Amino acid sequence: MLTSLLSDAFARPLEVFTRLIDNHSVEELNWKPEGADNSIAWLAWHTAREIDVQIAHLESRNDLWERDGWVSKFGLDLPADSMGYGHTPGEAQAVKIDDKQLLLDYLRATVEDATRYVATVDDEAMEEIIDKNWDPPVMRATRIVSIIDDAAQHAGQADYLGGMITRLR
C-alpha cells in the first residue's frame, strides 16, 4: 500500500509537467515573467535534478544526470553537479531547453527511478534516521515525502506560469 501511495505521489508532478511540456512551445517553456528567474523549463529541470540527486543519495550511488549522460545531452553552461538550489538569476537563465522531449525524458527517468527505489524500501528502512543534522533527525520516509513535496510545489509553480502563458497568447 505504501509503495502504491508513494508511486502515485511521484507521478502527479510528472503528469503536470508532461501536460505543460506537451502543450507549450520551446519558447514558451523557456519564457519567464519580467522580474522572475524561473521558467517552466527551469522548474521541470530542477524538479528532475532534485529527485535524481536525492534518490541517488538515499541509495549511495551516482545520480542519473552524470551516470546516464544526461549532463552532456543537455549541454547546459553550468557545472555538472548543478541542480538549481541557490542559482543566481544568470544561472537560472542558463537553463534553456531546445528539445522538449529531452526534458520530458529526463524527468520521466528520474520519476521512474524514484518509483523503483520506493518499491525496494521496507517499513524498517523507512524509519531509519538518515540525517542527524536536523532537529528532529530526518527519517528516510521524511526525506521521501520532502522530495515529493518539493516536486509538487514546483509543478504548481510551473502550472501557474503555463496559465499566464496561455492568457498572453
Image: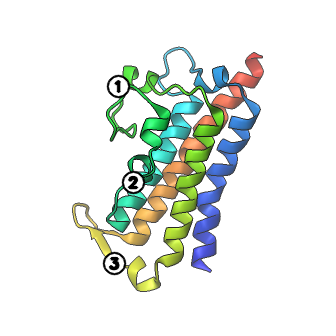
Residue 95 appears at what percent x and percent y? 47, 28
Instruction: Classify 10 Å Cα crowding around label 3: few (below 14), some (14-19), many (20 and above).
Output: some
Q: Amino acid at mark 1?
A: Thr
Query: In what element is the residue under mark 1?
Result: loop
- Residue 88 badge: 1
Q: Up-down: is 132 above or below 94?
A: below
Question: Which mark sits nearer the N-terminus, 3 or 1?
Answer: 1
Task: Tell me how far mark 2 sits from mark 1, CA to CA.
Answer: 23 Å
Q: Name the quadrant of the N terminus.
A: bottom right
Q: Helix, strand or loop at disc 3?
A: loop
| Residue at x-position 35% and y-position 38% | 82
Q: Nearer the viewer, mark 3 or mark 2?
A: 2
Is residue 138 found left or right of 117 in the rendered image?
A: left
Residue 128 - label: 3
Q: Earlier in the sequence, mark 2 or mark 1?
A: 2
Position in image of residue 28 (x %, y %): 66, 22
The three-letter code of the residue at mark 2 reads Asp
Residue in the image at 56% along x and 66% along y: 115
Residue 160 in view of the camera: yes
Q: Which mark is residue 56?
A: none
Secondary element type, mark 2: loop
Q: Earlier in the sequence, mark 3 or mark 2?
A: 2
Label 1: few (<14), some or many (≥20) within 10 Å? few
Q: Which residue is mark 2?
A: 63
